[in-house]
Amino acid sequence: MIELVLAADDCMTVRAELTGGDTERCVILYASQTIRADGIIRLLAREIEWPAELDYSRKSLLEAELKPEFIARITKRSRRDGTALVFVHSHPGSEAPHFSSIDSEGEAHLSGFLSRRHPKLNHVSLVVSAGGVRARRIGTDEEIRIVSIGANRQVLFDPTAGPYSISQVFDRQVRVLGSEGQAALQQLRIAIVGLGGTGSIVAQQIAHLGVKSFILVDPDILEHSNLNRLANAVPDDVGKPKVEIAARAIRALNKDAIVATVQGDVIQARIASRLLNADIIFGCTDSHGSRAVLQQISYQYMIPCIDMGVAIAVTERRISHIFGRVQMLAPGLACLTCSNLLDANEVRQDMMTAFERKADPYIQGEREPAPAVMSLNGTVASLAVSMLLSSITGLPIAARHLIYNGISSSLRTARAVPKESCYICSRSGALARGDSWPLFAREDADAH
């Protein structure tokens, strides 16, 4: 299976520009190619090139043909940059588009040319109309999935879609989300990084919602002091990996759930790479280093991440602040760097090995454990899960960055503007780079 992934803003621009005119038009997308562990090939559209009028050899209501010189030029560029090509053209009318015999004839020649000049990547043909989109591997009948990623994650076309069984257990939920929304939830593979105070609650809630496939990542075992805030943990679990406790709870709710447990730290590259198989990531960690890794994965591989945190400040036995934050990281939305939420020195320290931290003269003593209360964790976790529902099912909750003030019992939306030159979320940065850029993560575990 091939999956073409487009930023929601790009998808909107392409559809608006190509449809509604009196002639067919074309556009070229350059896409990074990655391959998931399950064999799904993901093409991440990262740049758009609009042909000029002189680049067309023919253009009418029913066809658009680009000149061989233009095709040769973009093929040379894609070969140099290691990117796949997505050839997009429009069809007239308001019906869902289908490839025509003219399309197939043109693709046969183009496919042969690309197989000789650029054989290692999967090139795609995409047709757009006012009624929808459709795509296939160029020169073949192999149709591919199209996904739009932004504030919402939308599957625009899926050749494998069909009737999907929904249990009566979810009847009350379907009355809110609709059967299509419930089906979309049940087909997701969700990664949860950090199975502590917030992560254990997120795992429980999304299992109740009907999600069936999970990737659980956490390096820690349950300690006695964790029992006050870890959902589904009991005293006999002390000493067990947190990922196993969460997995047990998920399987208790759904015996057919597919749960991959990864007992490791996401700041290690081999652990972080496991997240590339997810459709959505929940960031439930409490370190700047792990957040730096998660946000890079989110933008570089176009996998939405819902990051959250809870902070309680206690001074001289007096609670001065109770804050929670939930923020979606996805194309078109500001990253944590643009939001000024990452401390570079904290990231540096988190990425060190234990030996390096011990040897660093600027790091003194151990970090004090942060205060934590399960009900406050639960408030923030629930906001994050509701944000997921909005993104996937269309539940009318607009916010993608929330700040919770526990003392004033207030909830407000926040908005940070993505910076054009950001090294994480911009086109000049990590956005849609896929495997062509390394991850900012440690190559191996602590050696000392």
Image (spheres, rainbow, N blue to C red):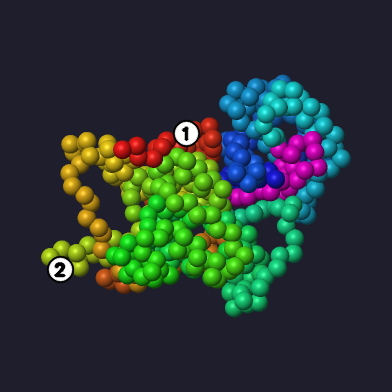
Seen as rendered, the residue at the extreme right is 101
Under circle 1, the secondary element is loop
Q: Residue 317 carries which label?
A: 2
Q: Main secondary structure of the magenta part?
A: strand
Q: Quadrant of the C terminus?
A: top left
Query: Disc 1 marks which residue?
Result: 438
Is 146 covered by the magenta stretch? yes
Q: How far across and down, in percent of the image, does residue 143 sit?
A: 75, 46
* Residue nearer the viewer, 161 or 202: 202
Query: As shown in the figure, which amino acid type bears the numbered disc 1?
Result: Pro
| Image quadrant where residue 424 sits | top left
Is there a contact, CB below 8 Å, between mark 1 and mark 2?
Answer: no
Query: As shown in the figure, which amino acid type bears the numbered disc 2?
Result: Arg
Under circle 2, the secondary element is loop
Q: Quadrant of the N terminus?
A: top right
- The residue located at (54%, 37%) in the rendering is 434
Q: How far across and down, in percent of the image, does residue 427 sit?
A: 49, 37
- The residue located at (37%, 57%) in the rendering is 221
Vertical position of residue 160 compared to residue 412: above or below: above
Is 195 covered by the magenta stretch? no
Q: How far across and down, in percent of the image, does residue 326 sit?
A: 40, 59
Vertical position of residue 306 compared to residue 288: above or below: below
* Residue nearer the viewer, 339 or 143: 143
Q: What stretch is highlighted in magenta?
A: 124-151
Residue 127 showing in the rendered view: no
Q: Which mark is residue 156?
A: none
- The residue located at (39%, 63%) in the rendering is 198
Q: What number of labels is visible?
A: 2
Vertical position of residue 71 compared to residue 440: above or below: above
Taking 57 as reference, is 383 left or right? left
Q: Residues within 10 Å of mark 2 (few under 14, many from 20)?
A: few
* Residue nearer the viewer, 239 or 118: 239
